[in-house]
Each structure stands twice: as structure tokens, then as C-alpha cells.
Image (spheres, coloured by chain):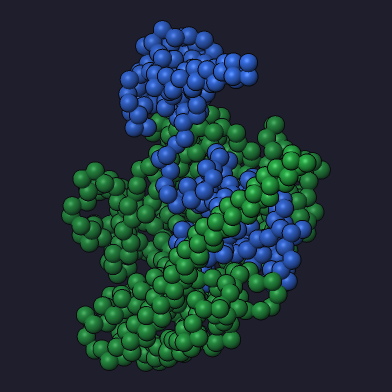
Chain colours: A blue, B green
């Protein structure tokens, strides 16, 4: 009896897995192309128009003009220029992938940016956006400072410098917001006001860190020199 | 009776098996633990020994500089020192040391390299090393020797292996840890470079003396954004390199943050919420429209004429770097960043940090060289597509008036700067086209 009860879920799981794998392998089954229509096509047209690739009407009908715009867009972004909006093109356009396929992580970011984003995610994922940018800025301020090593990896992996390196959280995949925060910091935005340290006032017992000149409080962190 | 005895025997043997099993498991764990410890210890050991070797070789090279007379030896030795200091600071950063005890040592290493690089630059300009600089070199060499002695002494005691606990990076109180250089007298170096005291302690030059109160700052912020000052929420202050008052609010359904300098009452930065999530690059035509919008925005806000330089695209926004233009000269030290929402063309952010740090009345001289004479100094293989006058910031903190030549060698994009007074090739930049826009390297 017990055996019989257990079996069906296992089969369902297997079937589900099989469906998932097939789904992944046969991704292009659902895509937007010549002849498609609807709200999603409208959204594609709108974005292409906003970004300068499309001049025609935003009418939700995937015609020759839309196809040409998609080809131009794909060429500009180094994608296969087939004029069909599949998962990759959809991701670049910032619209949900057709057919509900999983999100495609962009792997094109530079390694420094990605590492910085991982640090932001591990150290500050519960913080307000400004606090995330500030954490990234602290890393960059250290790189610029004569009192720290001179590159992003050397600063992040400096022994004992960040708890997330010791507890392994640095290895979690960053989300889009962490990536954006890292980008904003690398583009020069520094809400920390030039800080070299930050700490959580309700957790840190270090007299030393409390004695540093404080610059600003953002979310749960105090940023200091 | 029999039954109870059996139960007891079973229980006892089970417990015995459990104890045996656990002991075996703990031996395995202990063994694994010891291996990991040894591996980590080996990394520390290696870093420490490298640090000692590096200090030794830095000292030797610095003393050799004193004996050298030929430009070839100077260049080789200075380049070696400069390159090695990066590795030396890297070795130190691998050790379990406290920031409080070692930040002066890291600074000494970094500044030594930076100083040697500044000497290299002097030599390449045909200048020679002065007596004061020789004295500084000798002091640096002596300091390397003192550091060596301290390191050797610790090494003799078995550091970082035997019986030494790891120091934490952020100390609990005022203890400095085992590796402690906080009281060491390192020489003060007189030079200009990215790590020099003069650069690190630079004060903003673009701010007037009058102080803005929090209330005045709120007025300034509100006027800049075109909102009612009463709707702003005070977010406190930020007392960094440029002390500021900060506010938040919302406008047209977008939340924003804005930062106003206490000294001078200027906008340092502001950012509006942008939930685009799109990482696409616009067409060149669309980019030109956005850049024009950014230029117009800066002119409207009183920053005057500006020229767009490079741009990046992320999260549905373009971040456009614009340099103010004065009498036809592009002022790169005063670069301003403007964020624009690509869909709506609306400005959603500004960063005036560089502008406030560097902008000042400048006495821009007429160029000694004309564009044609400067072109002669540029490699003939550059297919020039643009020429203009630009003021560029150097690593030393100086500003130089240059002719800027934009162009291609084969399919690679370059920007080359020729000093408009001396004809010296001051800088060569390459533009990298990435998936997020352009990067100037």
C-alpha cells in the first residue's frame, strides 16, 4: 500500500522534469515573429521605437517594418539577426521571455562589475538602493586609497575585510538591483561621501569602529572614514 | 525476563556502535579540519615570506638607484619598484592582520610605488632626479630595512604559523594586533600622484564660502527640481569630502533623493527612481537626441555650454558624461554626469562631484601650437575624425591644455592628447565598445 501511494508523485516529478528539460532544449517554440500580434508585440514595438530602431505605428502587429527593426536591434547587440524575438532578444528588450521560459542571466558584464555586484548582494541586499550603491562605493574608495590594495578583487578578498567572504555569501548570484548599484558606483555615484568603512550600529561592538569619524547613516549602516 | 535481557543487550550494543561510529566520524572530521587549517596556514606562510622577500628586494632596488647614473638603469629600477609594490601590497592583504596595525605599512608600500612612478614621469620628460628626491629614496630604503627587521623577528618566533592567532581586520578596541606598524615613522613623501597626500586631501575648488543651512538647502533642492520645498523630507546630513544636506521626495510618481552641499549650497547629486530594467543600447540617432537633451538640461540649470563625451546604458537609462566648454575648450576635469530615461527622454539624475571639486575661474592661454602642428605629433596611422582643444586632468593633479585628436587605427577607436604648449603626447585613450555602451580606458 505504502509503496503504491509513494509512486505517483515520483512519476509526476519525473514527468515534470522531463517537460522542463524538453522545454529548455526546445526554447524557440514560443517566440514573436512575422505575423505575431497582441499586447506583447505592442510592447516590443514601443521599446524599439523609444530606443530609436522603429518608426512605424505601435499597433501590435508584427509586420515587415517591425521585423526590420528587430534585425537592426539584434545586429547592434551582437545577437543572431533572425528578426525573431526569442529569449535573448526579449531579455535585451527587457520584456518577459516568450513562452514563459526562465530568465536569462546576462553574462556579458565585466568581471570587476560582477564581483562588485556579488559583494553588494551579499553585504547589503536588505538595504535601500542608496545604501547598496554606498557599499559598492566603499570598495571603490578603498581601491583609490593609499591604505588599501589597488584593485577591486584585492580589496574585496583582503583577508577579513568583508564578512560575506568568510561565510561564503559572496558566492551567491547577484540580482539586477545589485548589478545596477555596482554600475552606479562604478560610474562615480558615491552616496557614502568617500567612506572607507561601514558597520551595523546595533550589531557592532567594536570600540575601534565606533571611534572612526562618521559620515552618514543609510538604512542599517553607518558609513565612516 | 529473557525479553528484558535481550532489550538491554541490544540497547548496549547499539549505544556502543553509535559511540564507535561517532568517534570514527570525529576522527575523520578532525583530520579534514587539520588539512584545511594546514592549507590556509600555507597561504599565510607563503604571503608572509613573499612580503619579506619583496621588502628586501625593494630595499635593494632603492639603494641601487642611488648608485645609478644612466637613464636606462633609472628607468629599469624605478619601473621594477613601481610594479613590485602592487604585488607587495597584495601579499600583505592576504595575511590575517588588523587594519589598525598595518594601514600605515600598506600606505608606505603604495606611496613608494607611486613616488617612483612620478620620478619615471619626470625622467621621461628629460628632467633629472633632485638631491631632495635622492634623500627621499634613501629614507624609503632605510624604512624597508626597518620593516624587514620587524618581519624577520616575527618570522623567527614562528609567525604566522605556530601559536599565533589570526588578528581580525576590524579590531574590537584599540589593540593593533601582532603585525603592528602603527607607530613606525615612515617618511613623508613630497610628490604628486594618485596616492599622494596632496591628492588624497584635495578640497573642493568649485564652492563659494557661504554656508547653506538645512532650510536654505531644502529651498535650493526644491527649486532645482521644480517641486514645493514643503514636500521634501529631510534625510539628514552626509559629512564626507563634500559635506551635504540630503532630502527625499517624489515628483510625477517617481521617488527622488537629492544632496545639496553645505558650503556654497550647490547640488552635489540627485537621482530619481528608474525601474526600466532594460540593458539595451539605443541607435546612434536616438543617442544624439538624448545627448542634446542632456546638454540643454545643463545649460538650463546654469552649468553653461557642454560637450558630451562617452555614455553607458543600463536599467533603461543612458548615463551621459558631459564636459563643460569654455571659450571653445572642453574642460574634462569638470565632467558632469547626467542620467536620462531612454523611453521618455526625461532627466533622472545628475552627479556634479567632479565639477564641484575642480571647477574654478581658469586663465586659459592661447595654444602655442596650432592644430596642424599638433597633428604632426600624432601617429600618422591615426585616421583623425575630430580635433578640438581640451583641458585634461593628469594623474599628478595638474591640468594641461591639449589638442584632442579622435580617430581610428584600423577599427579601433582612440583619443590622443597633444600638449598645446609643448607638443608632448600627454595621454592616449582607447574606447572600448561593450554591451553597456562605451568605456574609455
Quadrant for residue B359, please give it: bottom right
- Outermost residue, right side: B230
Residue name at image x 20 percent, y 57 percent: B379
> x%, y% of residue A12?
54, 17
> x%, y% of residue B267?
65, 52
Return the residue nearer the eye: A107 or A55.
Answer: A107
Please determine whether, in this image, residue B43 is positioned above or below residue A184.
Answer: below
Quadrant of the snapshot with the C terminus of chain B: bottom left
Residue name at image x 61 percent, y 50 percent: B17
Quadrant for residue A192, please give it: bottom right
Instruction: Answer left or right for B256 relative to B381.
Output: right
Please determine whether, in this image, residue B410 is positioned above or below residue A4.
Answer: below
> x%, y% of residue B395?
42, 67
Return the residue nearer the eye: B250 or B50.
Answer: B50
Return the residue nearer the eye: B238 or B347.
Answer: B238
The answer, for residue A59, to whether it is visible in the render is no
Instruction: Answer left or right for A165 relative to A108.
Output: right
Instruction: Answer left or right for A216 relative to B303.
Output: right
Count of numbered marks: 0
- Outermost residue, left side: B380
Quadrant for residue A191, please give it: bottom right
Residue name at image x 39 percent, y 44 percent: B438
The answer, for residue B56, to whether it is visible in the render is yes
Return the residue nearer the eye: B193 or A174.
Answer: A174
Quadrant of the snapshot with the N terminus of chain B: top right
> x%, y% of residue B406?
30, 50
Residue name at image x 81 percent, y 43 percent: B230
Amino acid at each position: 500500500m505504502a509503496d503504491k501511494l509513494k509512486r505517483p508523485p515520483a512519476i509526476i516529478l519525473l514527468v515534470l522534469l522531463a517537460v522542463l528539460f524538453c522545454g529548455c532544449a526546445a526554447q524557440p517554440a514560443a517566440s514573436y515573429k512575422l505575423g505575431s500580434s497582441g499586447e506583447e508585440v505592442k510592447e516590443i514595438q514601443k521599446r524599439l521605437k523609444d530606443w530609436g530602431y522603429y518608426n512605424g505605428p505601435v499597433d501590435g502587429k508584427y509586420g515587415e517594418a517591425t521585423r526590420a527593426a528587430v534585425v537592426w536591434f539584434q545586429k547592434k547587440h551582437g545577437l543572431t539577426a533572425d528578426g525573431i524575438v526569442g529569449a535573448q532578444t526579449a531579455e535585451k528588450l527587457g520584456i518577459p521571455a516568450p513562452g514563459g521560459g526562465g530568465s536569462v542571466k546576462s553574462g556579458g558584464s565585466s568581471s570587476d562589475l560582477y564581483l562588485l555586484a556579488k559583494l553588494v548582494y551579499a553585504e547589503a541586499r536588505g538595504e535601500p538602493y542608496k545604501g547598496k550603491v554606498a557599499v559598492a562605493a566603499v570598495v571603490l574608495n578603498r581601491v583609490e586609497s593609499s591604505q588599501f590594495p589597488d584593485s577591486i578583487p584585492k580589496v574585496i578578498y583582503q583577508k577579513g575585510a568583508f564578512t560575506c567572504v568568510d561565510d561564503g555569501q559572496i558566492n551567491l548570484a547577484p540580482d539586477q538591483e545589485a548589478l545596477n548599484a555596482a554600475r552606479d558606483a562604478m560610474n562615480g555615484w558615491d552616496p557614502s561621501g568617500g567612506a572607507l568603512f561601514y558597520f551595523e550600529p546595533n550589531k557592532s561592538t567594536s570600540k575601534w569602529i565606533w571611534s572612526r569619524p562618521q559620515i552618514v547613516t543609510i538604512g542599517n549602516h553607518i558609513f565612516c572614514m | 525476563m529473557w525479553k528484558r535481557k535481550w532489550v538491554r543487550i541490544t540497547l548496549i550494543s547499539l549505544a556502543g556502535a553509535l559511540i564507535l561510529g561517532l568517534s570514527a566520524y570525529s576522527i575523520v572530521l578532525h583530520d579534514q579540519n587539520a588539512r584545511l587549517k594546514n592549507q590556509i596556514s600555507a597561504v599565510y606562510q607563503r604571503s608572509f615570506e613573499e612580503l619579506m622577500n619583496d621588502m628586501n628586494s625593494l630595499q635593494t632596488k632603492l639603494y641601487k638607484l642611488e648608485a645609478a647614473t644612466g637613464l636606462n638603469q633609472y628607468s629599469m629600477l624605478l619601473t621594477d619598484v613601481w610594479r613590485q609594490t602592487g604585488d607587495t601590497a597584495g601579499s600583505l592583504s592576504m595575511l590575517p592582520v588588523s587594519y589598525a596595525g598595518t594601514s600605515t605599512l600598506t600606505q608606505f608600500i603604495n606611496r613608494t610605488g607611486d613616488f617612483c612612478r612620478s620620478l619615471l614621469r619626470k625622467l621621461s620628460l628629460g628632467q633629472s632626479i633632485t638631491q631632495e628626491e635622492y634623500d627621499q629614496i634613501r629614507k624609503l630604503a632605510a624604512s624597508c630595512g626597518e620593516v624587514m627587521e620587524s618581519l624577520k623577528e616575527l618570522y623567527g618566533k614562528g609567525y604566522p604559523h605556530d601559536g599565533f592567532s589570526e588578528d581580525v581586520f576590524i579590531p574590537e578596541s584599540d589593540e593593533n594586533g601582532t603585525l603592528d606598524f602603527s607607530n613606525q615613522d615612515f617618511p613623508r613623501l613630497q610628490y604628486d600622484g594618485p596616492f599622494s597626500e596632496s591628492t588624497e586631501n584635495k578640497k573642493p575648488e568649485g564652492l563659494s564660502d557661504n554656508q547653506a543651512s538645512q532650510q536654505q538647502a531644502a529651498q535650493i533642492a526644491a527649486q532645482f527640481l521644480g517641486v514645493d520645498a514643503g514636500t521634501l523630507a529631510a534625510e539628514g546630513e552626509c559629512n564626507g569630502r563634500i559635506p551635504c544636506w540630503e532630502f527625499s521626495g517624489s515628483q510625477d510618481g517617481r521617488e527622488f533623493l537629492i544632496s545639496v552641499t553645505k558650503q556654497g549650497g550647490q547640488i552635489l547629486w540627485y537621482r530619481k527612481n528608474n525601474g526600466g530594467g532594460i540593458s539595451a543600447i539605443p541607435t546612434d540617432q536616438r543617442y544624439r537626441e538624448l545627448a542634446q537633451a542632456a546638454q540643454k538640461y545643463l545649460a538650463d540649470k546654469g552649468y553653461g555650454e557642454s560637450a558630451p563625451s562617452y555614455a553607458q546604458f543600463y536599467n533603461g537609462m543612458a548615463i551621459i558624461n558631459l564636459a563643460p566648454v569654455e571659450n571653445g575648450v572642453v574642460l574634462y576635469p569638470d565632467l558632469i554626469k547626467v542620467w536620462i530615461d531612454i523611453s521618455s527622454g526625461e532627466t533622472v539624475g545628475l552627479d556634479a562631484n567632479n565639477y564641484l571639486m575642480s571647477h574654478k575661474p581658469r586663465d586659459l592661454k592661447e595654444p602655442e601650437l596650432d592644430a596642424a602642428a599638433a597633428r604632426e605629433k600624432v601617429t600618422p596611422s591615426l585616421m583623425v575624425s575630430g580635433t578640438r582643444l581640451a583641458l585634461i586632468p593628469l594623474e599628478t593633479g595638474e591640468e594641461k591644455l591639449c589638442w584632442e585628436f579622435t580617430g581610428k587605427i584600423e577599427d579601433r577607436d582612440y583619443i590622443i592628447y597633444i600638449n598645446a604648449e609643448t607638443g608632448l603626447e600627454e595621454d592616449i585613450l582607447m574606447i572600448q565598445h561593450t554591451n553597456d555602451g562605451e568605456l574609455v580606458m
